[in-house]
Image (cartoon, rainbow, N blue to C red):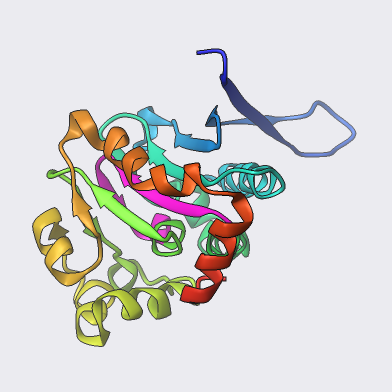
């Protein structure tokens, strides 16, 4: 399509030293379809687990989208898992305490356009932050949701329990964060953690359909209504 362009964001973390530079490859795929932006986490060999570089890449991509005139942005994952959360090796090295998690979720929460999380599969751990900060969340029937901070000995990011509690209530937030419960898509819908379940084959199409009115409206009108609801 002439109004569609694909931009694979391949940003590299460079460790500065007097010797050779070591580069960490991160792939966040960015696609623009008119006023719609789609960001896809694509690290399927690691269950789309997130490195610090990937967190920065997502924030940078959202900064670019916010500076433009997009009416909506969809966050999704490649393959059958949305994200397994933090990359295990980096989590052990301190990623669990990185401020980049909060920077990303704050960037999502303050986007001037509609934000839709299209959950193509399981959502786990720190990846909850960006999803909880979205305006809408839809998921495939096989998606599962868990945030095992109690078991792993980490604290959740500061904004995550507040956003989760607003969606599902205090008791159910404790079920996830303290009792370590893994919940399926139907239960997540019943709790209010997600807003709709969509078949795998039509997940993105349904996410785009939810964004249709925003895409047809003037960007400042989208921003104004979102601010009135209290999302900005």
Q: Is residue 117 magenta?
A: yes
Viewer-side residue, 175 vs 96:
175
Viewer-side residue, 48 vs 68:
68
Coordinates of residue 56 in the picture (x, y in percent): 64, 47
Q: Is residue 177 visible?
A: yes
In this rendering, the count of numbered labels is: 0
Is residue 125 shown left or right of residue 11?
left
Up/down of 226 relative to 5, above or below: below
Q: Is residue 31 magenta?
A: no
Residue at image coords 12%, 45%: 141
Q: Is residue 49 visible?
A: no
Coordinates of residue 120 in the picture (x, y in percent): 27, 39
Report the quarter where the C terminus lies. bottom right
Up/down of 148 relative to 59, above or below: below
Quadrant of the image occupied by residue 16: top right
Viewer-side residue, 17 vs 46:
46
Up/down of 116 relative to 209, above or below: below
Residue at image coords 17%, 62%: 188
Return the residue found at the far top: 2
Quadrant of the image occupied by residue 34: top right
> Which range of residues does the magenta coloring cover?
111-128
Coordinates of residue 99 in the picture (x, y in percent): 62, 65
Residue at image coords 35%, 57%: 136
Is residue 21 shown left or right of residue 88?
right
Coordinates of residue 216 in the picture (x, y in percent): 48, 42
Residue at image coords 28%, 39%: 81
Is residue 170 shown left or right of residue 7?
left
Viewer-side residue, 204 vs 154:
204
Return the residue found at the far right: 18
């Amino acid at each position: 399509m002439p109004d569609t362009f694909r931009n694979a964001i391949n940003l590299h973390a460079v460790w500065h030293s007097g010797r050779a530079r070591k580069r960490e490859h991160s792939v966040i795929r960015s696609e623009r379809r008119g006023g719609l932006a789609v960001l896809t986490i694509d690290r399927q060999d690691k269950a789309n687990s997130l490195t610090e570089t990937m967190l920065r890449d997502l924030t940078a991509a959202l900064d670019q989208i916010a500076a433009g005139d997009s009416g909506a942005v969809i966050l999704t994952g490649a393959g059958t898992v949305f994200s397994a959360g933090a990359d295990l090796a980096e989590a052990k090295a301190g990623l669990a305490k990185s401020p980049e998690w909060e920077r990303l979720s704050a960037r999502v929460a303050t986007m001037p356009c509609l934000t839709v999380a299209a959950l193509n599969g399981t959502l786990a751990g720190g990846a909850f932050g960006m999803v909880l900060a979205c305006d809408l969340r839809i998921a495939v029937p096989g998606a599962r949701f868990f945030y095992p901070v109690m078991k792993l000995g980490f604290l959740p990011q500061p904004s995550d329990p507040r956003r989760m509690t607003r969606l599902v209530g205090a008791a159910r937030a404790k079920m996830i964060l303290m009792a370590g419960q893994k919940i399926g898509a139907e239960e997540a819908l019943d709790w209010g953690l997600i807003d709709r379940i969509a078949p795998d084959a039509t997940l993105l199409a349904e996410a785009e359909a939810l964004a249709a009115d925003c895409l047809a409206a003037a960007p400042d009108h989208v921003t104004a209504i979102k601010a009135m609801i209290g999302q900005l």
